[in-house]
Amino acid sequence: MCRISLFLMLFFSCTACVCLSQDSLFITKTNSPTVSIKKDPKLDLLIKKQIQINEETSRNARRLEKGYRLLVISTTLRDEALAAKTKVYTAFPELKAYLFHQSPYYKVKVGNFKERKEADSYQRRLELLFPKGVFVINDIIEVKLKLPGEEEAPNQE
């Protein structure tokens, strides 16, 4: 019984200290068991503005289009798919590799090619690393948008 009352006494004295010490941080201490927090309404406006900026920049940074990717592996073993993705990054750091899980298969797709001939060129080179076959597939690709004054960037990233 003594331990419980000692614990309760310590708990309530510590909570009172926390409330008192944070009094300057918009927490108002009252005699009731509730705590009220005052927030500047400008914070909501700033948050909404930041959300809008984030959406616009991410939307403008990339867009999706029809294009081609290379399917380098389709396996039921996750480790094998990760190893293939690593092999692609090591040999072709300019290409972006994607790991998809479509139960029960793990698929590694490579590149963002607008033109079939670009995909065909990389297909021949990747077949040296993946002798079981590399396949050109139609896919929705990420296309980087160029900013005003920028030169056309390579689109296989």
Image (tube, helix red, strand yellow):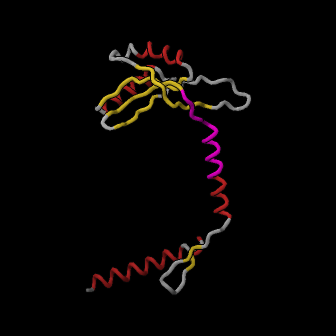
The residue sitting at 48% across, 23% down in the picture is 93
Q: Which residue lies most toward the right here?
A: 149
Q: What stretch is highlighted in magenta?
A: 51-66
Question: Which x, y percent locates residue 42?
Answer: 68, 64
Q: Which residue lies most toward the left here?
A: 1
Question: Which x, y percent locates residue 80?
Answer: 31, 28
Question: Which x, y percent locates residue 118?
Answer: 53, 17
The residue sitting at 62% across, 52% down in the picture is 51
Above/below status of 64 relative to 55: above
Report how many numbered discs are placed on residues in the image: 0
The residue sitting at 65% across, 68% down in the picture is 40
Asked whether 63 falls inside the magenta stretch, the response is yes
Question: Which x, y percent locates residue 123?
Answer: 45, 16
Query: Which quadrant of the figure has residue 84?
Result: top left
Asked whether 62 falls inside the magenta stretch, the response is yes
Asked whether, in this view, residue 96 is left or right of residue 61, the answer is left
The front one of 68 and 59 is 68
Above/below status of 71 relative to 18: above
Our reading of the magenta stretch's main secondary structure is helix
Query: Which quadrant of the figure has residue 57?
Result: top right
The residue sitting at 33% across, 80% down in the picture is 7
